[in-house]
Amino acid sequence: MSALLSVNGNGAPEKRHKVTVVGSGNWGSTIAKIAAENTKAHPELFEEQVQMWVFEEEVTYEGKTEKLSHVINTHHENIKYLPNIKLPTNLVANPSLEDAVRGSSILIFNLPHQFIHKTCATLKGKIVPYARAISCIKGVDVSDEGVSLFSEWIGDGLGIYCGALSGANLASEIAQEKLSETTIAYDPPPMDNSRNPSRTATPRSATPARSDPRSSGDNLSVTPVADLQHRDARGRISKTRLTPVPPEYPPLDHVTFKALFQRPYFLVSMVSDVAGTSLSGALKNIVALAAGFVVGKGWGNNAKSAIMRVGLLEMIKFGKEFFGETVSTATFTKESAGVADLITSCSGGRNFNGAMHAVEQGVSVQEIEQKELNGQKLQGTSTAAEVHSFLKTRGKEQDYPLFTATFDILEGRKSVDDLPAILAKAQS
Ligand SMILES: NC(=O)c1ccc[n+]([C@@H]2O[C@H](COP(=O)([O-])OP(=O)(O)OC[C@H]3O[C@@H](n4cnc5c(N)ncnc54)[C@H](O)[C@@H]3O)[C@@H](O)[C@H]2O)c1
Ligand SMILES: O=P(O)(O)OC[C@H](O)CO
């Protein structure tokens, strides 16, 4: 083990990582279940108790109106967002965001992307400066000026490093412990007390280590400070001065993150391409809507596969065009976060089902979301709008005909019957 670690008399690091999951929806509760199973299994790395921030609301339990957090803590079940799944007793639902993150060195962000801005604004200045984060959010942050990833947005906003977890991960199946793979992208600059600082790809560039006037003592000589730097699609460069993980803690590296997420039923592949992992999870939701449209029409599996093929090409093109060399094509074609997520989402995802039911019933996707999802949120509809706005500002709508048509269908400007012509144009 690295000489950077501060160890006790038994040779083990003195402190353990406290873990908080920010979010408690369908996927948030499932990931919190996994994390709590693993903190219990790895007492040498983590504090056993996992905090889960719950956006508080009232629910009806056995005929009585109760707070959701109270029901989770009393009955160990999220009856609204993950019903019929027993949650570990070391998972604690907490309606106070500030209290839930207090002292946590690992933050897992897992909530619908429309709520992340407000949540991060509340968190600013409330977390420990050496925290590291993983974003499980499938969406992109878009303004008319540009597009950025939530992993970047969270990292820059909170002054910490944030990686990404994404994959072929239908939450309901994983909650039932059915076999699944996932991809975790984590690639901080080589400054943490890491056992394996091998960096095969660099989604952001880190400037070389410099001494930090705010550091003092032994820490300064053994743990360099690094600036995390990235250029967004607006061409703007932002820099985050990272605070080192103190040497009393186990390293926050691939080994530790794999220990936090890997289960016998949840197989983790660790990679370095944060941008590709985040982007594929966001963009596949647009393709899943289009796949749902054609299946809703009764056009069958071949039509759906054609949508998926063209959609995958647009996903890769978008990544390459707007995130350049930071995105690896292999993430889209070889990882669970890429093609496997596209396949599962176009088979049984909420976006796919919502679009299919909308066409079958002749109503809007938003109406289906209201009617069928009991508070769960579709990410594809807002991502389609945001990506469309970004492309339109750049005059690039026609370069991404499937993304553009999907948004136009959602808006009622085009019909599903226009899709065959779009697919015909995509033939070489
Ligand atoms: N559900 C899945 O199968 C799945 C799988 C992989 C990834 N994801 C991604 O995970 C992310 C989280 O999705 P989910 O399925 O956990 O959520 P969900 O669709 O179940 O959304 C509901 C959550 O939003 C919360 N919420 C409602 N209003 C809020 C507000 N004003 N502020 C903050 N929170 C509020 C609710 O309390 C609830 O926790 C999304 O980006 C999604 O794309 C989902
Ligand atoms: O149900 P969806 O459409 O939000 O997709 C869920 C997951 O992203 C599938 O990996």
Image (cartoon, rainbow, N blue to C red):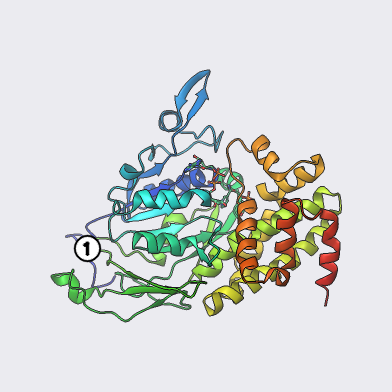
In the drawing, does residue 377 fall left or right of residue 68? right
Query: In the image as oriented, which residue stretches furthest toward the left?
Result: 217
Residue 98: image quadrant is: top left
Residue with the mark numbered 1: 11
Q: Amino acid at mark 1?
A: Gly
Position of 199 relative to 13 (above/below): below
Position of 381 relative to 5 (above/below): above
In what element is the residue under mark 1?
loop
Q: Is residue 41 visible?
A: no
Residue 6: image quadrant is: bottom left
Q: Quadrant of the C terminus?
A: bottom right
In the drawing, does residue 96 fall left or right of residue 427? left
Mark 1 within 8 Å of ligand 1, using the beta carbon: no
In this rendered view, identify the residue nearer to me: 192 or 413.
413
Residue beneath the point at 34% across and 71% down: 195
Relative image position of residue 249 (x, y in whole percent): 26, 60
Relative image position of residue 31 (x, y in whole percent): 49, 49
In this rendered view, identify the residue nearer to me: 117 or 174.
117
